[in-house]
Amino acid sequence: MKYLIFLALTIITGNSFSQENKKDKDFYEMRIYEFHSADQQKLIDGFISTALIPYLHSKKIYKIGAFTALANDTAKIKKIFVLIPYKKLADIPSINKSMFADKNVLLNGEAYLNATSENPSYDRMMSIIMEGFRFSPTLTPPSLSNSIAEKVYELRSYESASEKKYWKKVEMFNEGGEIPLFARLGFNAVFYAEVISGPSMPNLMYMTSFESMASRDEHWKSFSNDPEWKKLSSLKEYEKTVSKNNITFLKATSYSEY
């Protein structure tokens, strides 16, 4: 009888913990603007800094990251990344839709919003929707002291060959212990998330941050040589869970909240 009572309490506690974690999870939108000219970049920067971010603040959304790709200077397709956290999945379409009825957005975003087909504000815009990991449910802006020019943000995207492989990689981060391993080694992770809608799936994404590129290289060297990582990565259940690894190095814009 005591065992049954204990079992019932365990199930109830576990369910409550699961619901609490689910409730507390952040959802993220990673908005990616692709462009080719300095004029377009000026329009996008102006819209994000004077219209989008103030509007999101009015909706009590803060900790908005805005980045450019380190490769922009030489890349034919240049990119600006905007990371927006939400408390509810349903907020993403409703807040984005109502934005274009906001007086401040219409005023400060006029040049961007009224761009023509001959001179568009951007060449393409993508939106990736994500949900925070079980063991890292919310966004954490990093504490970095270096200058904007020196700080480096590393965005990683891990694709898998099947949904089964994907969920094992997600498990590897959570129950497997990869998240606390990154924390112990000082990777300053901004977020870990499951991609629930995007151009490449199944897929997970996460962002780490460093004082400099040299610091980034040192951290990854320590990670590769860490006994805990060697043990975790040698487990057969986690073999070949990633079929494609995309890495994008970013730097914060002057108006980013990181």
Image (cartoon, rainbow, N blue to C red):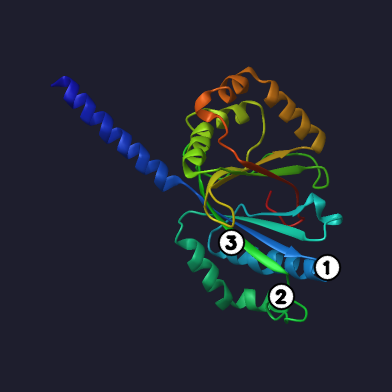
The amino acid marked with disc number 2 is Tyr
Residue 58: which quarter of the image? bottom right
Please report contact status of discs 3 and 1: CB closer than 8 Å, yes or no.
no
> Element type at marker 3?
helix
Query: In front here: 145 or 64?
Result: 64
Pointer 3 or 1: first along the chain: 1
Does residue 185 show up? Answer: yes
Q: Which residue is mark 1?
A: 37
Residue 42 in picture, x, y percent from top left: 79, 68
- Looking at the image, the residue that sits furthest to the right is 74
| Residue depicted at x 61% and y 23% | 229
Residue 239 in picture, x, y percent from top left: 56, 29
Query: In front here: 120 or 144?
Result: 120
Left or right placement of residue 163 versus residue 185 in this view = left
Please report contact status of discs 3 and 2: CB closer than 8 Å, yes or no.
no
Q: Residues within 10 Å of mark 2 (few under 14, many from 20)?
A: many
Label 1 to label 2, Cα distance in Å?
14 Å
> Element type at marker 2?
helix
Residue 39 in picture, x, y percent from top left: 82, 71
Q: Residues within 10 Å of mark 3 (few under 14, many from 20)?
A: few
| Residue depicted at x 35% and y 43% | 19
| Residue depicted at x 51% and y 45% | 132
Left or right placement of residue 138 versus residue 109 in this view = left
- Looking at the image, the residue that sits furthest to the top is 227
Q: Which residue is mark 3?
A: 57
**Number of the label disc, if any, that sits on residue 112:** 2
Label 3 to label 1, Cα distance in Å?
29 Å
Please report contact status of discs 1 and 2: CB closer than 8 Å, yes or no.
no
Does residue 140 show up? Answer: no
| Residue depicted at x 60% and y 67% | 55
